[in-house]
Amino acid sequence: MHRTILTVGIALVAFASLAEDLPPVSNRNGLTLRDLVGKDTFVSVVLKDRGATDQNLRVVEIGPNYFSVLTQNGERMPYKFESVAEVRIQDGQIEARKFNLDENRMLKVEEQKVVDRALERAREIFDAANSDQTVKMRAATLLAVSGRADAVDYLRGLSTTNDLATDIDASLRLYLIGDKETNKAVLAKGLQSGDRKVKAAAVKLAGLTGDKDDIPILVDMLQERTVDISAPAARALARLDCRSGIPYMVRMLVELNEEKGNAAIFALSRLGGQDVVSQLKDKLKTTSGQTQYRVITCLYKLKDPLGKELMIKQMKNVPTLAPEAALVLARDGDWDAVQYLTGRLKRRYDETEDVMLYRAKAAAALVANADPTAISYVQELLRSDNVNIRKQICILLADLGKKRLIPILQPTIESADADLALQACAATVAIAKPDFRERYIEYQQ
């Protein structure tokens, strides 16, 4: 009898010892793996052998020598303690990225020549733009990214003037070049400014630079009725991984105002979590048309199976929403969506701005899905007389990030329109420098 009790006791002690040998958790709050069980917190698991990282997981169980997670697709996956180097707490959901061979290779000679010319053109505009400070700052940003010390000094000098609008604008430019220092006094003044454009820019700066001290004031701004403040506040709070604003964001999602709706899509898709998914599914029951499409878009971006199913139905069964649904689905390789966009691009079209912009987005979606023939449509639109369309295409090309697209920007870099030329220069530098590209695309959203 005593021997049995002793054996059981030894086994329990061994079990407890093994159970506590948990992989370390990398975070700011001293949490352990056990603290994460059943929470909506997204984590990344770093494996020992390969150094590989699995992202967007949620911890659901801890066993004697393993722990289990829930993947984005709702699958349960176990990891042995001994195979895990660490578990990292994420700042929200991370968008999965496919390996892009073109993005990760060295620049070819002809591509490097275009990048060099883009920087030369930025210098020309910088030197000639003494009467237009905004244009000069944009040119300085590109020069600073390439390591020009005088351009960095120029931007830093403008971030501490007596003009608040200039200070905020220059601070945003410093974010773009990767400068992590933010003038807290300038940011605080911006958030309290009576100039709504300055306030909106300050809200954007707070989100981009990760300033969590101002979350309470941003939550108040989120509840404002006017879109010029509430929309940037939603984006900023999502970047700061603040979930307390989710109920307001869900309301924004189904309002009639399109700008508010788009901001809510951005915010809710970035924050994610089962609580968000549940609220979105509830909204499906009380919405229709465009507002319901926004809900579906959120579910799709959150990789919920119902989101994909409904997005496909929108493309096939709702003619008014099919064009937008096809853009979303084609980027992820949906065959029917690719065929839909290919057919649209082959048609004759009216050269109105809305039609041309849709063609640009359609071509970009096909290029993203590795269709090289669609590049010809992009080149055609870059020859348009519509300057605004050409600027939008430059942003789309930067977002694609494919180095083989750099040469098609050469003619636009040479434009006599300084604003357009800088947009092409920025796209070129963004494609060539992935770290700048990430900040540049984030800034554009």
Image: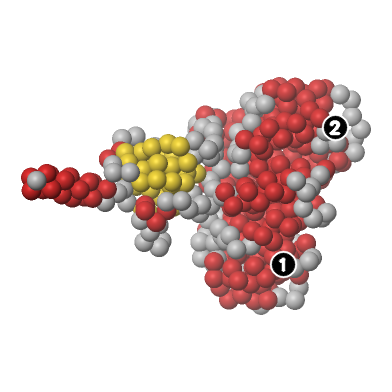
Q: Earlier in the sequence, mark 2 or mark 1?
A: 1
> As shown in the figure, which amino acid type bears the numbered disc 1?
Gln
Residue sitting at x 87%, y 41%: 353
Residue sitting at x 73%, y 58%: 251
Residue 197 horizontal/vertical position (percent): 75, 67
Distance from the alpha carbon under mark 2 to that under mark 1 = 34 Å
Within-10-Å neighbours for mark 2: few <14, some 14–19, many 20+: few
Q: How many marks?
A: 2
Q: On the image, which quarter does residue 369 sit in? A: top right
- Tell me: 28 left or right of 419: left
- Colour pattern: secondary structure
Within-10-Å neighbours for mark 1: few <14, some 14–19, many 20+: some
Residue 100 horizontal/vertical position (percent): 54, 31
The residue beneath circle 1 is 223
Instruction: State the residue in front, 239 or 255.
Output: 255
Whether residue 399 is visible here, answered yes or no, is: no
- Tell me: 395 left or right of 6: right
Residue at the extreme front:
1
- Tell me: 213 left or right of 260: left
> As shown in the figure, which amino acid type bears the numbered disc 2?
Pro
Residue sitting at x 32%, y 51%: 24
- In contact (CB < 8 Å): disc 2 and disc 1: no
Instruction: State the residue in front, 380 or 200.
Output: 200
Residue 127 horizontal/vertical position (percent): 67, 56
Kind of element beneath mark 2: loop
Position of 281 relative to 208 (above/below): above
The residue beneath circle 2 is 319
Kind of element beneath mark 1: loop
Residue sitting at x 72%, y 67%: 223
Instruction: State the residue in front, 337 or 254.
Output: 254
Position of 240 relative to 411 (above/below): below
